[in-house]
Amino acid sequence: MKRFLTAGILALCLLSSQIARAQEDRDVKIKAEMVENYLIWQEAMKLTDAERIISFESREFTTTEFSGEITSKSDSNARLRSEMSAIRKVNAARVAIKKLTIEPNRVVVLSNKHYDVITEATNTDTNKPNGMFFKVKYTLTSRDIWVEYGGTWMLKRTEIVGFSGGATSVKNDFSD
């Protein structure tokens, strides 16, 4: 009887160890996928490829602005497309993952997105003459919520939790 209990305890320990190892393997895979997603995002920003950034979003994607206002996927994407189309030169675009937390049904990523671009004012910009160029440098800190759909991690919500930077006017020859 004692041998049977010992064997049972050993089997449970082995099974527990295998489950823990499988969870660690899953976590490593998820972290690698998230790093890859943010590297693709960074490259898309350098190429001003709004559609590539949008391709990460789930159908129910929303953005919670720094003010607390919630923006729908369609409104958020319209703004992104407009902002990207106004960029005339990308001096720098970097994305840094500050913290990554894997939860049972989602992944939460705190990230900094650093942009340094030359952008052209359009008739939708307030207080800026149409056709004027601006050097825009900013860092956006966001809390991104990713969920898995059919084996693919999709961005469900972005919460803007920090913003720093600003714009200065420049000559229209894209010089700094």
Image (cartoon, helix red, strand yellow):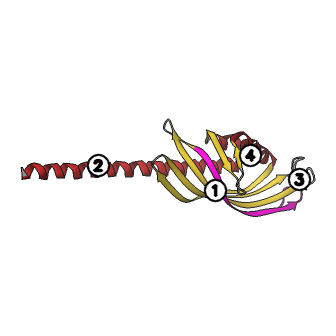
* Disc number placed over residue 126 in the picture, else none: 3
> Mark 2 or mark 3, which is nearer the start of the sequence?
2
Q: Secondary structure at mark 4?
A: helix
* Disc number placed over residue 80 in the picture, else none: 4
Q: Residue at x 79, y 63 (%)?
A: 166
Amino acid of disc 4:
Leu
Q: Position of residue 141 (x, y in %)?
A: 65, 59
Q: Secondary structure at mark 1?
A: strand
Of the pair 91 and 124, the residue shown nearer to us:
124
Horizontal side of residue 101 vs 1, given as left or right: right
Proximity of marks 4 and 3: CB atoms separated by less than 8 Å? no
Which one is in front in this view, the residue at disc 4 or the one at disc 1?
Answer: 1
| Magenta stretch: helix, strand or loop mostly | strand
- Calculate the distance from the C-alpha at mark 4 to the C-alpha at mark 3: 17 Å
Q: Position of residue 142 (x, y in %)?
A: 63, 56
Amino acid of disc 3:
Thr
Proximity of marks 2 and 4: CB atoms separated by less than 8 Å? no
Amino acid of disc 2:
Gln
Of the pair 96 and 47, the residue shown nearer to us:
96
The quadrant of the image that shows the C terminus is bottom right
- Calculate the distance from the C-alpha at mark 3 to the C-alpha at mark 2: 59 Å
Q: Which residue is mark 1?
A: 142
Horizontal side of residue 165 vs 18, given as left or right: right
- Calculate the distance from the C-alpha at mark 2 to the C-alpha at mark 4: 45 Å
Range shown magenta: 155-176
> Mark 3 or mark 1, which is nearer the start of the sequence?
3
Q: Which residue is mark 2?
A: 18
